[in-house]
Amino acid sequence: MESLAWMAWTWQTATFFSVILLILIGMTIWERVSPSGERVGVLRLSTTRGDRLFISLLGAAYIHLAWLGLIGTEPALYWATFISLVYALGVFRWA
């Protein structure tokens, strides 16, 4: 069996992938319990919950990259995470 030493498995990396996995499991359960249809949001795009989750995750990645590029790591990245959560709530509510 190949060694997995090539991957930097820090607790932050493990937490990141665990949270993504839990979000996907939660969305799957939510869809099973309460199936959703497509909805047209403020941008006039027809989206489902899964589409809005993808848009939220993609936006969070860009928010974090912009934070690192423009501001750096000195102000904690928790602010970028907070901004990403507010963005995700907005996407799920209005997009």
Image: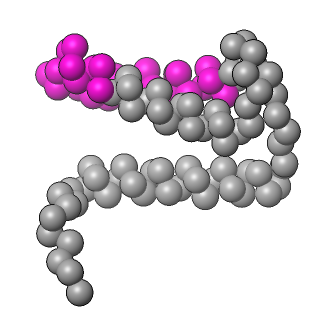
Q: Does the stretch in magenta take in 87? A: yes
Colouring rule applied to residues:
one colour
Residue occupying image coordinates x 61% and y 20%: 90
Judge left or right: residue 30 versus residue 71.
Answer: right
Judge left or right: residue 54 versus residue 8.
Answer: right
Judge left or right: residue 73 versus residue 87.
Answer: left
Kindly tell me whether residue 84 is visible in this rendering: yes
The number of numbered badges drawn on the structure is 0
Q: Residue furthest bottom?
A: 1
Which image quadrant: the N terminus? bottom left
Task: Please give the range of residues in magenta.
Answer: 65-92
On the image, which quarter does residue 50 sit in? top right
Vertical position of residue 69 compared to residue 6: above or below: above
Which image quadrant: the C terminus? top right
Q: Does the stretch in magenta take in 26? A: no
Residue occupying image coordinates x 47% and y 27%: 59
Q: Position of residue 74 (x, y in %)?
A: 14, 22
On the image, which quarter does residue 10 sit in? bottom left
Q: Position of residue 8 (x, y in %)?
A: 17, 58
Q: Position of residue 17 (x, y in %)?
A: 39, 54
Residue occupying image coordinates x 22% and y 14%: 70
Kindly tell me whether residue 81 is visible in this rendering: no
Residue occupying image coordinates x 20% and y 72%: 4
Magenta segment's dominant SS is helix
